[in-house]
Image (cartoon, rainbow, N blue to C red):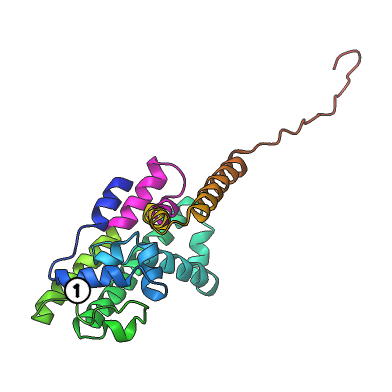
Amino acid sequence: MLAVYRLGSSLRVPGVDSQAISQLREASKSQGALGFLNLFSGGAFGSFSIFALGIMPYITSSIIMQVLTVVIPKLEEWQQEGATGQRKITQWTRYVAIGIATLQGAGLTFIFGQGRGSAFFSASRKAPDVVLLDPFMPRALLVIPSLVAGTALLMWLGELISQRGIGNGMSMVIFASVVSGLPYNYYSLLQTRKTLVFVILVALSIGIIIAVVRVELGQRRIPVQFAKRVVGRKM
């Protein structure tokens, strides 16, 4: 399932300029908003793929629903209903996530379709002004649904991993997004002859993984002694 996610990260949305995408990919390697979005989308944003929005709309939706649970009595009532109420909240979380993805997809489409890319995303490497090919509106009607469908597919993959895989599916998707950029970063360190930094980072990465595994799988057995009741000569 994670392989499907990595494959979709390189599947470009229809109606975009290949030269502008190359420029966007280079600009996404810099620090700032572009670099942040590209990091949490596993490089999908820099390629303007169907997974360019990543899992962030779902995370935002989850936070909104948690806040609204305190404010809206109906949601609080669902929360107290157990598994049935939780399914209702999860379903509404999906609806809100699709709405957020639609707004974000439309925003990105208009930013990169109306020549405002470099002005909106200030980066050390200049972002392209226009990514979409002309004419704009027909291309936008292709790009926005593609981005929303990509987010919906990511939500489905995340829930599938939660049900049949290991751990929380959404966390695994974010983990795969972040880790996918590590090989390139390590290779860049070796290319610039920063061997010591490379060794330290690799050692830290391995140490963090070992520490997390030990914390997650650690057990502490506590002996429990029950009081014995004596009836006559029997216990």
Give the structural element (helix, strand or loop) at label 1: helix
Taking 152 as reference, is 125 above or below it?
A: below
Give the percent coordinates (x, y) of residue 59.
43, 64
Give the percent coordinates (x, y) of residue 148.
25, 66
Taking 114 as reference, is 102 above or below it?
A: above
- Name the residue: 20% across, 58% down: 11
Q: Residue furthest top?
A: 233
Determine if residue 6 is in view.
yes
200 within the magenta span: no
- Name the residue: 62% across, 44% down: 215
- Name the residue: 32% across, 61% down: 43
The image quadrant of residue 128 is bottom left
Segment tinted magenta in the rendering: 153-179
Residue underneath mark 1: 20
- Name the residue: 46% across, 71% down: 64
Q: Quadrant of the N terminus?
A: top left
Q: Residue furthest front?
A: 193
Determine if residue 92 is in view.
no
Tell me which amino acid carries mark 1. Answer: Ala
The image quadrant of residue 120 is bottom left
> How many labels were placed on the picture?
1
In front here: 72 or 11? Answer: 11
Give the percent coordinates (x, y) of residue 227.
85, 28
Q: Residues within 10 Å of mark 1 (few under 14, many from 20)?
A: some
Q: Quadrant of the C terminus?
A: top right
Give the percent coordinates (x, y) of residue 35.
38, 70
Is most of the magenta stretch helix, strand or loop?
helix
The image quadrant of residue 220 is top right
In front here: 118 or 105? Answer: 118
In front here: 192 or 123? Answer: 192
Report the side of 100 relative to 143 (left or right).
right
